[in-house]
Image (spheres, rainbow, N blue to C red):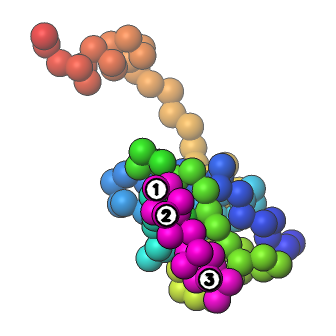
């Protein structure tokens, strides 16, 4: 199966690690060491940024700290390109392996679990 082109809407922040998870349907990866610019930097330095992209660099653009866009060189399979540059760590197991995790029935209802997490006020 060929990976689908990268869609910035599929990026999900992983706050505990400070990385981004990329979900392309059947494949997952974690984006690492990618250059990030703010929307203001993109506006003010667009020429230099686009020259870097033309040289093969992938740049993510943020707006108020959230990823708003991912600028990639044209005509490339993004996931394969990021893997080849060491900027993505492929998933160790396929997403289908998550189905093998046994579900458990909670002994407490959701209200009591939330109350326990919130603690006494």
Question: Are the two marked residues, 1 and 2, in contact with CB atoms closer than 8 angstroms?
Answer: yes
> Residue, x 23% and y 20% (percent of image)?
118
Answer above or below: position of 66 versus 71: above
Q: Is residue 25 left or right of residue 30?
A: right
> Residue, x 48% and y 74% (percent of image)?
34
Instruction: Estimate how packed mark 3 is, as few (under 14), some (14 to 19) or many (20 or more) residues with alpha carbons within 10 Å.
Output: few
Instruction: Estimate how packed mark 1 is, as few (under 14), some (14 to 19) or many (20 or more) residues with alpha carbons within 10 Å.
Output: few
Residue ID for mark 2: 44
Answer above or below: position of 33 versus 63: below
Foreground residue among 98 and 5: 5
In the rendered image, which quarter contains the N terminus? bottom right
Answer above or below: position of 29 versus 108: below
Disc 2 on helix, strand or loop? helix
Foreground residue among 93 and 41: 41
Tell me the distance, in whole angstroms, between the alpha carbons under discs 3 and 2: 14 Å
Residue ID for mark 1: 40
| Residue 6 image point, x, y percent | 72, 64
Disc 1 on helix, strand or loop? helix
Q: Is residue 121 magenta?
A: no
- Name the mark nearer the viewer: 1 or 2: 2
| Residue 108 image point, x, y percent | 38, 17
| Magenta-tinted stretch | 39-55
> Residue, x 61% and y 56% (percent of image)?
69
Residue ID for mark 3: 51
In the rendered structure, find residue 13 and report the number of the disc placed on it.
none
């Amino acid at each position: 199966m060929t990976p689908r082109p990268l869609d910035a809407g599929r990026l999900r922040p992983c706050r505990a690690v400070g990385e981004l998870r990329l979900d392309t349907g059947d494949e997952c990866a974690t984006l690492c060491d990618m250059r990030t610019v703010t929307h203001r930097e993109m506006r003010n330095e667009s020429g230099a940024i686009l020259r870097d992209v033309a040289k093969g660099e992938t740049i993510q653009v943020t707006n108020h700290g959230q990823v708003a866009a991912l600028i990639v060189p044209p005509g490339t399979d993004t996931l394969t390109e990021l893997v080849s540059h060491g900027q993505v760590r492929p998933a160790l197991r396929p997403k289908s392996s998550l189905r093998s995790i046994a579900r458990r029935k909670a002994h407490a209802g959701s209200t009591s679990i939330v109350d326990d997490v919130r603690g006494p006020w």
